[in-house]
Image: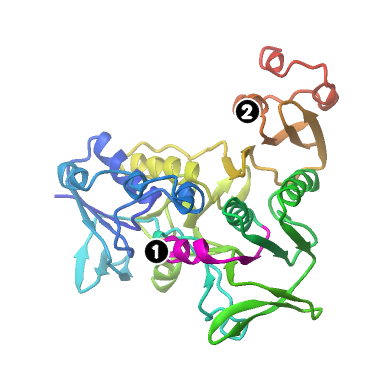
Amino acid sequence: MSHIVVIGAGQAGQSVCETLRSAGFDGRITMAGAEPWRPYQRPPLSKGYLLGEMARDRLFLRSADWYAEAGVDLRLGTEARDLDPAGRTVRLSDETVVYDHCVLATGLHPRRLSAKAGGDLAGAFTVRTLADIDALEPALRTAGRLVVVGGGYIGLEAAAVARKLGHEVTVIEAGQRILGRVASAETAEHVRQLHRARGVEVIEGATLDRLTGEGGCVAGARLADGREIAADLAIVGIGLLPDCAIARDAGITCDGGVVVDAQGRSSAERVWAAGDCAVFPYRGQPTRLESVQNAIDMGAAVARNIMGAGRDYAPVPWFWSDQYDMKLQIAGLNRGWDRIVTREGTGPSVWYYAGETLLAVDAMGDARAYMVGKRLIEMGRSPDPDTLADPDTDLKALLRS
């Protein structure tokens, strides 16, 4: 009987298993995850779950019974190592298993501050796993002053939650502006003003020297220019790294993630990768996407290709970020843009062009702009930038023209 082993029990791994079964695979499926919990949603962790607005049970993608009913051998708290593509074996904790296909859905892990920079102080938290949030939540309830290291989406979402809870919040961003890697200056300015209007101090172009401590606990942050910021708690959101160790140790090509072809195959025969850890060709460039959409869709695509579909994975990326009562929705990938078009609707939207080609849209509180932009990108259509910039242009009419 054919055996497929999925390493990683997150959104991508879950999608692989579900799609295999729905596509008619009747062999063995083993899914191994390092965490002690069955697959769960990550986006609500730093929002509704942290605020106490979402019950723990609602995080899980499937009930505990589903795995037995679907014939998925779910192994939690299980370390996967010693992947041997030549022998088609992998060690899961203390057992070596043989596979016919192996899918790497290992995801990401957060960058951490070194001990020298105060990363080992009590009260210094990362925001990635259920365990992280369960540890952070009681500390956040009692903290008065919070410092957030990193002005990306993770840090800014954490800042928004902390302000909702009434804390003093300072965001420290080493780059010249927040969202420097992922959004235009126009989008960043809107988000910056949103936070400042809510009372968050945003300090940009400021390198952290180290977190300072008293009695082994966070007491503040010292910047490289000597400034001191008092704090009872620190959230560190300085980026995520693909978890490629098992692939790299097995001699599989890794370069900013596990490198795969357009159908999800790695450099090792019968070893595939999907989700946050995978680097795949997208519009002629190696690309790694950190999103729920990519985890679900790529996991499903890889499962179908294992079953013989032979189809390239060609996504239209989309993302979102909830901050206060503003939903930032993003469609497309803004890589290589050379022109920005801004519009005002129920909220501002920023449209990215490379020449005359529409690449992406950031919609801030404007669901219509997001939906129209996403549909245009899916259709491969690019409205004239000047027409789009005209406030009298009906966005929906662009879909019919």
Rendering quarter of residue 7: bottom left
Point out residue 302 in the picture as x, y percentages from the top left corner: 39, 45
Residue on which disc 1 sits: 131
Q: Which mark is residue 6?
A: none
From this view, report whether residue 24 is shown above or below residue 280. above
Q: Assess disc 1: are there few (<14), some (14-19) or many (≥20) residues with their C-alpha within 10 Å of its C-alpha.
A: few
Point out residue 215 in the picture as x, y percentages from the top left corner: 54, 87
Please say whether residue 355 is visible from this viewpoint: no
Amino acid of disc 1: Ala
Of all residues, the one furthest to the left in this rendering is 1
Q: Assess disc 2: are there few (<14), some (14-19) or many (≥20) residues with their C-alpha within 10 Å of its C-alpha.
A: some
Q: CA distance from mark 2 to mark 1?
A: 33 Å
Q: Which residues are magenta?
A: 131-151
Relative to 57, 197 lies left or right: right
**Residue at image location 80% in from the left, 33% down from the top:** 342
Relative to 181, 280 lies left or right: left
Magenta segment: does it hold 140? Answer: yes
**Residue at image location 67% in from the left, 12% down from the top:** 400
Quadrant where the image shows the C terminus = top right
Of labels 2 and 1, earlier in sequence is 1
Point out residue 276 in the picture as x, y percentages from the top left corner: 49, 54
Magenta segment: does it hold 232? Answer: no
Relative to 377, 302 lies left or right: left
Residue on which disc 2 sits: 367
Amino acid of disc 2: Ala
**Residue at image location 49% in from the left, 51% down from the top:** 51
Determine the secondary structure under disc 1: helix
- Whether label 2 touches label 1, CB < 8 Å: no
Q: Nearer the viewer, residue 184 or 267?
A: 184
Determine the secondary structure under disc 2: helix
